[in-house]
Image: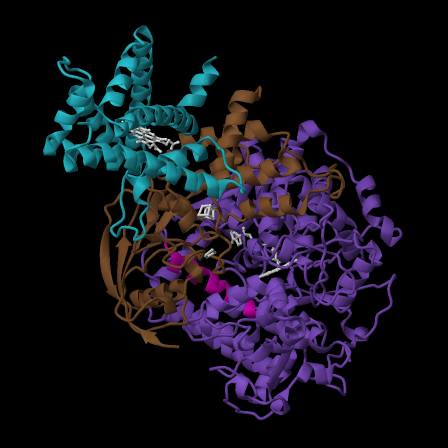
Amino acid sequence: MSWILTVLSSSIGKKYIMAVSGACLSFFLLAHLIGNSVSFWGKEAYNSYASHLHSLGFLIYILEILLLLLFLVHIVMGITLFIENLSARPNRYAVKEKERNWSASTMPYTGILILLFLVVHLVNFHFITKTVSTAELVKTTLSNPLIASFYLLSLSGLTLHASHGFWSLFQSLGINHQKYNKLLQLGGLAMAVIIGTTFILIPLLIVTTDSFLQ
Amino acid sequence: MQLDHRIPSGPLTEKWDRFRFETKLINPANKRKFEIIVVGAGLAGASASATLGELGYNVKTFCIQDSPRRGHSIAAQGGINAAKNCQNDGDSIWRLFYDTIKGGDFRAREANVYRLAQISNQIIDQCVAQGVPFAREYGGLLANRSFGGAQVSRTFYARGQTGQQLLLGAYSAMMRQVKTGKVTLHPRSEMMDLVVINGQARGIVTRNLITGAIDSHAADAVVLATGGYGNAYYLSTNAMASNVTATWRAYKRGAAFANPCFVQIHPTCIPVHGTYQSKLTLMSESLRNDGRVWVPTRSGDKRPPTEIPEAERDYYLEKKYPSFGNLVPRDVASRNAKEQCDQGKGVGDTGLAVYLDFADAINRLGEAAIRQKYGNLFDMYEKITGQDPVKEPMTIYPAVHYTMGGLWVDYHLMSTVPGLFVLGEANFSDHGANRLGASALMQGLADGYFVLPATISSHFAKSALVPITTSHPAFTEAIDTTKGRIQRLLSINGKRTPDDFHRELGLLLWDHCGMARNEAGLKLALDRLSELREKFWHNLKVTGSGADLNQTLERAGRVADFIEFAEVMILDALSRQESCGCHFREESQTAEHEAKRIDDTYSHVSAWQYQGEDQTPTLHKEPLVFENIQLSQRSYK
Amino acid sequence: MNIIHLTLKIWRQTGPESKGSFKTYESGPITTAMSFLEMLDVLNERLILSGEEPVAFDHDCREGICGMCGSVINGTPHGPEKKTTLCQLHMRHFKDGDTLVIEPFRSRAFKLVKDLIVDRSPFDAIIAEGGYVSVNTGGTPDANAIPIPTFTAEQALDAAECIGCGACVAACPNGSAMLFVGAKISHLALLPQGQPERSKRALAMVKKMDELGFGNCGNEKYCEKACPKGISISNIARLNREFMKAAFCSVEE
Ligand SMILES: Cc1cc2nc3c(=O)[nH]c(=O)nc-3n(C[C@H](O)[C@H](O)[C@H](O)COP(=O)(O)OP(=O)(O)OC[C@H]3O[C@@H](n4cnc5c(N)ncnc54)[C@H](O)[C@@H]3O)c2cc1C
Ligand code: HEM
Ligand code: SF4
Ligand code: FES
């Protein structure tokens, strides 16, 4: 079975890992988004979603561990690639290329931003002894303009990360066909924008409107 | 010097089979005991290296470029001929053979050319098996086009980059042998000398172009596949590194040089636009299928082409050659363009160009149809000149393109130095006095894949070769000579660059040994040449040292050889007092100013033998015997 | 035809071990009909006469097909024109007074040789691992024995057009050779002749590519933009697919 190790440690194998973990994270993101979108239907709905989620009990722990593993794999691999790539091109050019591919070039940096966000996010909502309802917790935490703007920034970063990532993962897995390439590209971008803006709406509405989650 | 062509006896169609049957073979286990040096990794060199490696020989392959994939063959555009008769239009091995002999104006050997036509079909099979993506018909079978005025469609092609695809095929086959260890590559190495021991070619001296190291390599046979010498003219369609150095060094060690004055000048190239010009770009000859060639009727007419009315245009080819019109062969089209420009009717800034006009074809077929046919050529033209051939006529002018002359070889492709084989454009073998379009690629691959591998074993089987190492005094001598030459080039410290001298040489040859030659001009050129040589060795400037990468030094060495070589070229042109193919002696023309061959006196190959520094070389003649075809005068009226 | 004057900042480095730096030259009068390399020729002629070593740069065909030329002009390999090699880039695309920064291709896998010349032999080493169909000369079937659809042949040629110039590696911020390798893998994977060794080839060539110090593909598309032959990154996707099939579905290891 050593061939598996050989394959996965090759340059292309590492990209498979990135792509598969990225794809799974994207599914999580989608699920997380759908869950949180319940907030648009008001406080009660949101709280009931939260309690339903917690009633999963044992299952939720397993999912959390899986998610943690996914993140770890994605992050460790991402950082490995970043370091390897830096050393593959030790000298930069004196003049920078004019037309830059921003979303792609910033993957490692938006990635780190997401990581920071995760820590803050988990400290805010996970590693906390809850005294109030989830809705109230979200509302009060995100009412803090500092935290809210950090959320806005990181979620924009996430959007950028996903806008390249969604298309990129298909390319990395070799899913590519002349007839569908445009669809994949536009679809990936659309997904990223939809997910991104919907997430961003939550802190944005909290800061701008009093009635949200009230 | 004995010029024994070693053509097997028997009927023409059976010679090659007979040769292969009668050849003594080498036991497969013994092949690995032989070392072969291949200089050059163009089509001929790469295909030879690959095949020799497959057969089990130990091969060392040298080339100038950083990778063998870049040899000059890569630039061939049009295609490669084969007698497969895929189009059922009446082609056959015999017709390809006949067309090649006739196209060469009856100055090539029947037996060699027949063998080439025979092998042509196998080449296509071989290339397809390697994964060369030739153009296909919708049914999935191979497509063909007609090329260079041929009446049958026998040219196989891969868009406008057939040479590239064929070379990548040969290169990849060779790289497979590199992997097996049978072929060792020496890129960025230039052959500086041939080492001959006991009358046998036994090694070479090279310069490592990165470190400047002068190395020597011993072997049981040396194969030269170093391409043509068109760059003697400075401006040509050849790649910048194309040179005569390798063949010239071999000549100086005893290999005869055959027909050096046979140089093909291609009619449709992008004209020169300034003195800084470094090379000329070929525009595929297929353009003449739809483009009409013209100049203004009045000499010195400087109006832009679109303002010259129809009545004041001279479609000189159509007028002069009603039946072939714009499709006359390369040499005829080139000569006529020169004639028009000599009369002051040339167009463009320099007056050295004629128009190739697509307006009529566009009116007839529509712009879209013309773009579909020639789009990539139009783009290439526009990229270089900044002008759109749809809006205004192209300007074209002839340029040096291919050299039919080369080292003399017999039927075995062996030169007059035993153990020295010469392949591809570097030899003189198959094209006579003029090469047909799409036949050079065919010849390079025939030589490398099929002919040499068969003949070299016969050489090994027959000769008793004593083991030799590079410590033999002949190697030391060759190394010293090479080092001395380099030192000499570096120490002149004059005031002119190698390119500057090269440009002067090019102009001299172009003016007097180009499209039209005459005795007075050639003699003048000889005088001017010796002056140029004087000046070169007294006023050359080369910067840097010989001990690292030094491109100025590389060029200087090549220019020095071109200057020496030019003398033989002019002597050859002087001695052949007939017109044939590309060689147009003004003294020998018909009443209608067409080339006139003189078969009684000149139906021979001229082979020049080196006699020592500053000595006039000796001319040897190999008579050409035509037993299977009738000689005829070409006519395109 | 116009005359322009340019300021040229050119990377000068005497050898692989020495330290390089930019040196500034005035171009002198340059006609706009010149190619970029002819502009360098003019500069070099002047340098030789003044006793300074000319700028070393690689070139051969000057027709955009041999793949030997290539430097980075103002941050872009082969300069600003799309689908154009440096030798086919003409000076009419520049304005009087422009400053051009001319640098060698940079990546760990391509060692610098001198000035603008780098060593691209790693490409040859990758091809030697499997960029071929293992057929010996002779004994091959008739060329028309296997029909190949026009579209397939054209698609294979689209990939096979790669001239091995290395601009893709130079353009890639990660120094990855995936476009070059993808092009060769695609060329042979598309054709029936390439099938027998399809899996072996993909595994071996990728292994070599990794060993030689090229970076990992980040799907950033800089390579495609710089490629003078317009090789598409769909060839990289095909390489990813071929490698996956070879790794997980074939018996090759
Ligand atoms: C623009 C153009 C288009 C053409 N189109 C066609 C066409 O459509 N059809 C056709 O049939 N023919 C065509 N030709 C002609 C054809 O391309 C050449 O004749 C043929 O490719 C020559 O191949 P070769 O292997 O003999 O030599 P080359 O390809 O010239 O290779 C020479 C090799 O020798 C090496 N070398 C040279 N000197 C030395 C030295 N001193 N030391 C070490 N190595 C050395 C070089 O590095 C190179 O590897 C064309 C030619 C040109 C210029
Ligand atoms: C929910 C969060 C995340 C999602 C949905 C996500 C998704 C993706 C996707 C789909 C890809 C494309 C993979 C490919 O190119 O095949 C990707 C690439 C990448 N991700 Fe993430 N990611 C997330 C978080 C992170 C984090 C926390 C990091 C932290 C370091 C990170 C670093 C990277 C890097 C560096 C790449 C580029 C890899 C490369 O192409 O070289 N990502 N991501
Ligand atoms: S893929 Fe394009 S850029 Fe890369 S080597 Fe080939 S031709 Fe050059
Ligand atoms: S010199 Fe051949 S591609 Fe530029």
Direction from residue B614 to residue B159 in the image, left or right: right
- Give the residues in magenta: B550-567
User: From where the camera sits, is residue C213 visible?
Assistant: yes
Choose between A191 and A47: the one closer to the eye.
A47
Residue B414 place in picture, x, y as percent: 68, 50
Q: Which of the 4 quarters of the picture holds residue A35?
A: top left
Direction from residue B99 to residue C62 in the image, left or right: left
| C21 in relation to B530, above or below | above
- Rendered residue at 32%/52% (across/down): A99
User: Which chain is depicted purple?
Assistant: B
Residue A161 place in picture, x, y as percent: 30, 35
User: From where the camera sits, is residue B255 visible?
Assistant: no
| C146 in relation to B287, above or below | above
Colour that chain C carries in the picture: brown
| B528 in relation to B386, above or below | below
Residue C71 place in picture, x, y as percent: 36, 53
Choose between B594 and B543: the one closer to the eye.
B594
Q: Which of the 4 quarters of the picture holds residue A131?
A: top left
Q: Which of the 4 quarters of the picture holds residue C186?
A: top right
Asked whether B558 falls inside the magenta stretch, the response is yes
User: Which chain is depicted cyan?
Assistant: A
- Rendered residue at 19%/32% (across/down): A203
Asked whether C44 falls inside the magenta stretch, the response is no
Q: Look at the magenta stretch and give its main secondary structure.
A: helix
- Rendered residue at 38%/25% (across/down): A27
